[in-house]
Image: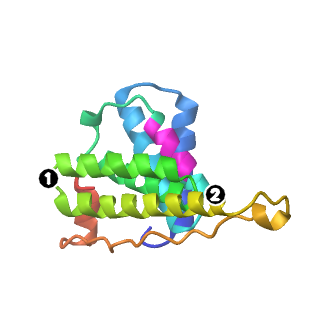
Amino acid sequence: VDGDYVSAVGIYSSIISDFNEEADANSASLVVRFRALSHRNAALLSLGRNVDALNDAKLALALDIEASSLRDGEIEALRSRTGRAAFEVGRYREAKIDFEIAAQLASKAGRDKAAAQYREHLDATIAKEKEISSAKSESPNVSSPASAAPVPISPVKQQPQQRPTMPKYQYYQSDTV
């Protein structure tokens, strides 16, 4: 599905609907559903469908799943994408929480570079939140439609992900995230 995010959303949606129909609460079904929601979240985020991405992330995080059932870094990656989606839709408090959790998980796993990156996102979120709150406190209460216009959100700078050095077919068949 390399770069074809629309197809990816369709594929993951069909997997999610298959596992919704089963309504099976066994661990393997929950893991598959978590991964499908998480990967669809990533595809939706890439398409700029931030509200849908945020909803998928919340559904995945709400599943009663043990972290030991997941691959190393899966929850961290989902929390990071949840923070990005929340930031993009202007939910800065939610974004702060998700970036904090992602940074803690990365630090705990010894991924200091990733933890630093999440902290940068966290700092940008805090700055944006302060900027908006100070703008609100400085501006008088005006009941014009212009004052209700959404504030444009600048995207958080993303570092390009490192591609695996192994051939693509081996990467997708391996247990790495």
Give the residue displayed 58% in from the left and 32% down from the top.
Answer: 21
Report which residue position mark 2 lands on: 137
Q: Is residue 107 above or below residue 159?
A: above
Identify the mark nearer the N-term, 2 or 1.
Answer: 1
Q: Which mark is residue 143?
A: none
Q: Quick check: 65 left or right of 141?
A: left
Q: Position of residue 122 (x, y in %)?
A: 38, 58
Name the amino acid type tagged 2.
Ser
Quick one: which residue is furthest to the top in this view? 25
Q: Which residues are magenta?
A: 54-61
The N terminus: image quadrant: bottom left
The amino acid type, in three-letter code, at marker 1 is: Gly
Residue under the point 38% across and 55% down: 80
At a point 55% along the width and 58% down the height, the residue shown is 9
Q: Dot 2: what SS?
A: helix
Q: Is label 2 or label 1 in front?
A: 2
Q: Residues within 10 Å of mark 2 (few under 14, many from 20)?
A: few
Asked where in the image residue 66 lies, by quadrant, the reply is top left
Specify the quadrant that holds the C terminus. bottom left
Dot 1 lies on which element? loop
Determine the residue positioned at 54% across, 40% down: 18
Q: Is residue 89 visible?
A: no
Q: CA distance from mark 2 to mark 1?
A: 41 Å
The residue at which mark 1 appears reads as: 110
